[in-house]
Structures are given as C-alpha cells and as structure tokens.
Amino acid sequence: MKTLEELEPHVRRLSKADKQVLLGRLEDMLEDELEFTDTFNAKIARAKRDIASGNCRIVKP
C-alpha cells in the first residue's frame, strides 16, 4: 500500500480530466463511509411526512 506522500507526485502528473475523475471517485468513497445519525434520519422522516401531507412549498430556480 502506497502512502499519500508516494501517491501525490503521480496524481500531480495526471491530466486535469483524470484529476476530476479521481476527485469524483474519492468523493463517492467518502460518501459511502458516512453514517446517518439519528438526528439526520429523523429530519428525513419528518420531511417525507411533510411532503406526503402537502406541507411543503415548491421553489423555482
């Protein structure tokens, strides 16, 4: 397993497009590692109930 210090020079040599792809993959990996807290889950459940009951507003960009 390479260390970050060993990988960094290789990453610097990547094209901008490849760096963007790498960034996306790293973001996906980090998202996969996140755990939802009870507070977050409660907010999602409340939002779903509000939407189901029509207690929401539509925001147009």
Image (spheres, rainbow, N blue to C red):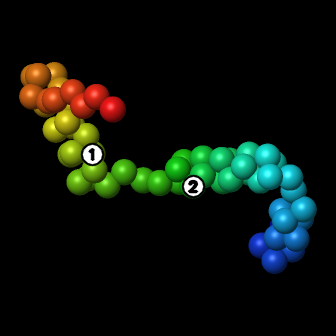
Task: Measure the C-alpha gap from mark 1 to mark 2.
Answer: 19 Å
Q: Sequence order check: which comes first, mark 1 or mark 2?
A: 2
Which residue is identified by label 1?
41
Q: What amino acid is labelled 2 in the image?
A: Leu
Name the image quarter holding residue 55.
top left
Q: Secondary structure at mark 1?
A: helix
Please identify the quarter of the rendering in which residue 8 is found: bottom right
Q: Position of residue 7 (x, y in %)?
A: 84, 68
Which one is nearer the viewer's eye here, 54 or 60?
A: 60
6 is higher (above) or lower (below) than 19: below
Camera sees residue 27: yes
Q: Is residue 30 above or below residue 47?
A: below
Judge from the rendering whether residue 51 lies leftward or rightward of residue 15; answer left or right: left
Q: Which residue is mark 2?
A: 30
Kindly identify the residue that appears in the image at 20 percent across and 36 percent down.
47
- Depth check: give the residue in front, 47 or 57: 57
Q: Residues within 10 Å of mark 2 (few under 14, many from 20)?
A: few
Q: Is residue 29 visible?
A: no
Callout 1, which amino acid? Answer: Asn
Q: As displayed, is residue 39 above or below residue 12?
A: above
Residue drawn 25% across the image and 40% down it: 44
* Front one among 13 and 36: 13
Task: Check disc 1: other Cα within 10 Å, few if <14, some if 14-19, many if 20+.
Answer: few
